[in-house]
């Protein structure tokens, strides 16, 4: 690698200035000694094609994509890998040596990395998983659970049509259940995941009774504002191991760095503390 080059990456979204990704990636530039910067791209949807096509000329190694660009980008980049096609969204774009754009999705790796760090003894094949929600985050979660050998994923969503499409696209033993069965769907589950926006700052909490939850069930949420949702707090109070959404954000970063720079940075306690302080409003 030529370290005389200034390495540029960034995140495209609309809105995007709330993202903590620059803090995380710029910490890794400092940690690794690689000269470069990770920047914000506040970009309305109509600007996405021109912005992505400009990356090679501007000497960017690639970028991350967040709402609302993850779907539109699939039609813009030159190649999309099988994982992103299955999940139905791109979270990471790589500028290849020939200037072409390659898209993948690292959200599922972020989910798994977070789960395995939060619950080191967790195994995907330990029993059924229950996933609440059928949006883009849920697609990444379900793909991750299938990859880790989950014998069944009980997918609960207000709109059964959306859940059925997810089950068809991801493949594997996914059972779609109606919304009114969400409480009973926790019985015997080894893993339970909230993949909706319920519980996020400004949103109502997830209405889910935890009476059927086993003590050894690992409970996760993909939300990181707040750092602990009411759902996770209730599960932790019952004695369950929990994994918040911040870890999912942190752990999708190293796979992206591997693709961009052939380096794998470390998710350190210091980095997590910095991110937590920022989200809590203390930095």
Image (spheres, helix red, strand yellow):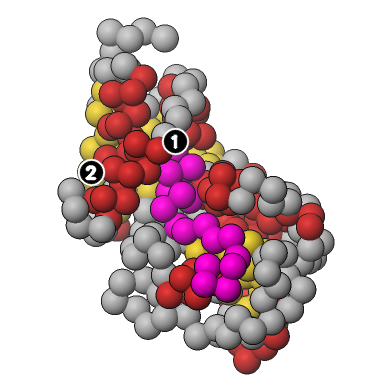
The residue labelled by disc 2 is 40
Q: Quadrant of residue 92?
A: top left
Number of the label disc, if any, that sits on residue 188? none
Q: Give the range drawn in magenta.
A: 236-253
Q: Which of marks 2 and 1 is nearer the N terminus?
A: 2
The residue labelled by disc 1 is 267
Residue drawn at the location 44% of the way across and 27% of the way down = 265
Q: Where in the figure is residue 99, as x and y percent of width and height?
A: 41, 25
Q: Say whether residue 72 is left or right of residue 195.
A: left
Q: How far apart are marks 2 and 1 (CA)?
A: 21 Å
Residue 100 against residue 77 in the figure, above or below: above
Q: Can residue 131 be seen in this view?
A: yes
Q: Is residue 160 visible?
A: no
172 or 184: which is nearer to us?
184
Residue drawn at the location 69% of the way across and 48% of the way down = 121
Residue drawn at the location 60% of the way across and 66% of the way down = 240
Q: Say whether residue 131 is left or right of residue 26.
A: right
Q: Please check the rendered image and state whether residue 250 is part of the magenta-colored stretch, yes or no.
A: yes
- Mark 2 or 1: in front is 1
Mark 2 lies on a secondary structure that is strand
Quarter of the picture containing the N terminus is top left
Mark 1 lies on a secondary structure that is loop
Q: Quadrant of residue 272?
A: top left
């Amino acid at each position: 690698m030529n370290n005389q080059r200034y390495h540029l990456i960034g995140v495209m979204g609309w809105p995007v200035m709330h993202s903590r990704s620059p803090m995380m990636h710029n910490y890794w530039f400092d940690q690794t000694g690689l000269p470069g910067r990770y920047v914000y791209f506040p970009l309305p949807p109509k600007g996405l094609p021109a912005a992505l096509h400009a990356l090679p000329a501007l000497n960017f190694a690639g970028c991350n994509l967040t709402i609302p660009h993850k779907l539109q980008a699939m039609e813009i980049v030159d190649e999309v890998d099988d994982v992103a096609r299955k999940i139905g969204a791109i979270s990471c774009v790589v500028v290849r040596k020939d200037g072409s754009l390659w898209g993948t999705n690292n959200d599922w790796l972020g989910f798994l990395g977070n789960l395995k760090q939060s619950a080191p003894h967790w195994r995907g094949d330990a029993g059924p998983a229950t996933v609440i929600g059928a949006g883009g985050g849920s697609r990444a979660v379900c793909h991750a659970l299938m990859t880790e050998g989950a014998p069944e994923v009980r997918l609960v969503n207000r709109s059964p049509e959306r859940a059925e499409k997810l089950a068809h696209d991801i493949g594997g033993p996914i059972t779609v259940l109606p919304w009114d069965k969400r409480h009973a769907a926790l019985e015997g589950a080894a893993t339970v995941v909230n993949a909706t926006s319920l519980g996020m700052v400004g949103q109502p909490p997830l209405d889910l009774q935890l009476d059927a939850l086993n003590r050894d069930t690992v409970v996760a949420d993909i939300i990181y504002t707040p750092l602990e949702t009411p759902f996770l707090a209730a599960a932790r109070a019952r004695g369950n191991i929990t994994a918040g959404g911040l870890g999912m954000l942190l752990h999708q970063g190293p796979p992206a760095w591997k693709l961009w720079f052939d380096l794998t940075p470390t998710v350190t306690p210091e980095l997590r503390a910095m991110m937590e302080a920022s989200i809590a409003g203390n930095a």
